[in-house]
Amino acid sequence: MPDAQPILGEIADLYAHADVGDGMLQAAAAQLRRLAGSPPAAEKRLTVPVHEHLAAALKAASRGPLAGIAKAFAAIEPSCRWRQNPNYTVATLGERFMDNYGYVELVGGDRRWASDSIAVGFLLLGPGVEYPAH
């Protein structure tokens, strides 16, 4: 498995420098830095149909302010488990949505880095797809 800790550092840096709210993101940054010191749990590789859009999304992100995060995520993505919410189905949201939606959870309960107090991951939506209000 490639060195996975840089992704948490990149996300922590983004959160630490956020100028919003009541310090919640700064507290999350501190938690991510602590987690970065521990090795991640292995996950079984799994992809979902939206994965076909990942290369284009990472290429676009690499040209902007999130370039460090895009590079760090690209390095660990081959060992990631992509997921879809089991409550979402073709019957409720349609085939187009289900083929163009997926996420990777890095931090959370029973994830690569276990935490009961914070969840961090990436959502990928295909072109023209909007996440439903909830």
Image (cartoon, grey):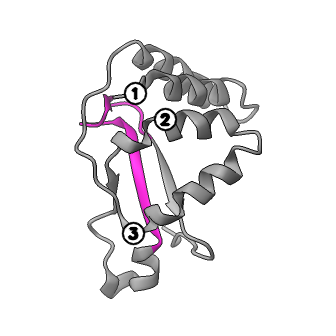
Q: Where is residue 22 in the image (x, y as percent from the top left)?
A: 66, 30
In the structure shown, which secondary structural element does the residue marked by tag 3 occupy?
helix
Which residue, given by chain and number where applicable, does mark 1 sit on? 2
Q: Name the residue under label 2.
A: 75
What is the number of the mark on residue 37?
A: none
Using the numbered discs, state the Cα–Cα distance from disc 2 to disc 3 in whole angstroms.
20 Å
Question: Which residue is at a point 43% across and 43% down the rendered structure image?
Answer: 77
Q: Please, what secondary structure does the residue beneath circle 2 have?
A: helix
Name the disc covering residue 49, or none: 3
- Around disc 2, counting alpha carbons within 10 Å, would you say few (fewer than 14), some (14 to 19), or many (20 or more)? some
Residue type, label 3: Pro
Q: Earlier in the sequence, mark 2 or mark 3?
A: 3
The boundaries of the magenta stretch are: 100-120
Residue at 40% across / 48% down in the picture? 104
Specify the amino acid type for callout 1.
Answer: Pro
Q: Are marks 2 and 1 in contact (CB under 8 Å)?
A: yes
Answer left or right for 60 relative to 52.
right
Q: In this view, does 57 lie above or below 5?
A: below
Q: Residues within 10 Å of mark 3 (few under 14, many from 20)?
A: few
- Distance from disc 3 to disc 1, alpha carbons, whole Å, reads 24 Å
**Crowd band around label 1 with a 10 angstrom C-alpha radius: few (<14), some (14–19), many (20+):** few
How many numbered marks appear? 3
Which image quarter: residue 87? bottom left
The quarter of the displayed image where residue 37 is located: top left
Q: Which of the marked residues, 3 or 1, is nearer the chain's N terminus? A: 1
Name which of mark 2 and mark 1 comes first in the sequence. 1
The N terminus lies in which quarter of the figure?
top left
Question: Is residue 114 located in the magenta-colored stretch of the structure?
Answer: yes
